[in-house]
Image (tube, grey):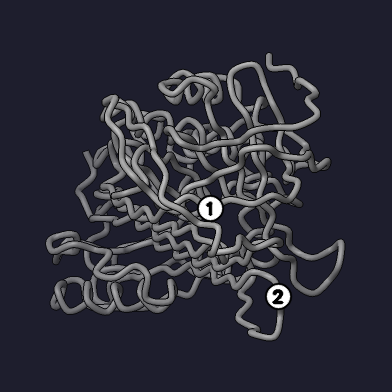
Amino acid sequence: MEIAEAGRGEVAFAMRALHHLARLDAGASNLAISPLSIHAATVLLGAGARGATLDEIVAFLGPGGGRSHALLASHVALRVLADSDDTGDAGPKVRFANSVWVDVQAARLKDDYARVVAEHYRAQARTVHFKTMPEQTRGVINQWFSAATAGLIKDFLPPGSVSANTRCILANALYFKGVWERKFDAQHTQPRTFHLPDYTEVLVPFMSSRESQYIDCCTDWKVLKLRYACGRGGARARQFAMYVYLPNQRHGLHSMLQQLASNPELLSKDLRRAVPVGDFRVPKFTISYKTEATGLLRSLGLRLPFDEGAADLSEMLESTKTADERFFVSNVYHQSLVEVNEEGTVAAAATMFGCLAGSSPSMFSTPVPVVDFVADHPFMYLIKEERSGVVVFAGQVVNPSL
């Protein structure tokens, strides 16, 4: 029950974050984020916080409470996204990695923190030379991100993101490669018109199929579920699916996102019955999105960890040089990539929290016999793990040609 409640909080965070990012540019950009990657890195931060800082992190994660979110993060690291690279298994190939990088000269991880993050979140602790070799260390960490995402995310930390004042970096990396349970026939892929938010049009390749699909029709949008092939384990295996939320109106994406962010329970559609389709088309797309996410997290309620005077991360780090040295989060980077084609989906994500040292101062389903689903205008997508309910990736497609 605790994990389920935390999972609902993670889904709600996914919608709040996506809605906020979409509003920044009036919904004009393609978006791809990994709420689960941000959740994992935030839980690592919370494991080292206390007092008001810990209370704010717990409130930011959701109403389930600190223990439930810790259990969810552990469940994800040890089971839901446990590494799977067995090429003989039809299921998704998954890599999920947490790491903590700490300066060898100026700081050290507290023993209890290092033990907890290793045992419960599979986080590797590594000592590096931020103080004396910040740029070389940035290169080493970027190599770790690249390896953990099968080379999809390169040069993640930009120049200047690591300095001689950096004491610790919390990192999460995620890789996913899933094959559709029922692949699209590439011979049926054809260029068709996609309607853009500025009332212009582009030609993009649309995948199509005549097979029945998992579709639900709501008052203001339709929902399509595309299942990925499961691996070994039968009914107990991990089960992933992509959900496509298509507004009925060509310019209805903003309104739909607003409704779903305000009431994420509307996402809870149990699409178990396939329905016959008439005109069925979904565009191929590739989206890469990177952001310095400090502003996003602040706007969603996470402020104290960034406050040099108020942040309390004393359960994580202690200075080896100055007794009154305190630590706070200086920057947060996040990047996601999602590629969808006839075979399935390849996706990756990276999240980094950098810590510096400072001195102390209602929708109703409508039954229909045959359903058209033509995603020829902006839509939202989610990639979820069905058994846990967590949102692994989320985003919007406003121009598949980019």
Asked if residue 160 shows in the view, the reply is yes
Q: Is residue 125 left or right of residue 225?
A: left
Asked if residue 47 shows in the view, the reply is no
In the image, what residue occupies the spot 21% across and 50% down?
Answer: 358
Mark 1–mark 2 distance (CA, rounded to whole Å): 22 Å
Picture disc at residue 90: 2
Residue 336 place in picture, x, y as percent: 39, 55
Residue 249 place in picture, x, y as percent: 49, 20
Above or below residue 254? Residue 90 is: below
Above or below residue 366? Residue 316 is: below
* Classed neighbour count for the residue bearing mark 2: other residues with Cα under 10 Å, few (<14), some (14–19), many (≥20): some
In the image, what residue occupies the spot 32% across and 51% down?
Answer: 289
| Of the pair 119 and 249, the residue shown nearer to us | 249
Q: Is residue 215 left or right of residue 205?
A: right
Picture disc at residue 207: 1
| Of the pair 293 and 268, the residue shown nearer to us | 268
Q: Secondary structure at mark 1?
A: strand
Q: Is residue 358 left or right of residue 152?
A: left
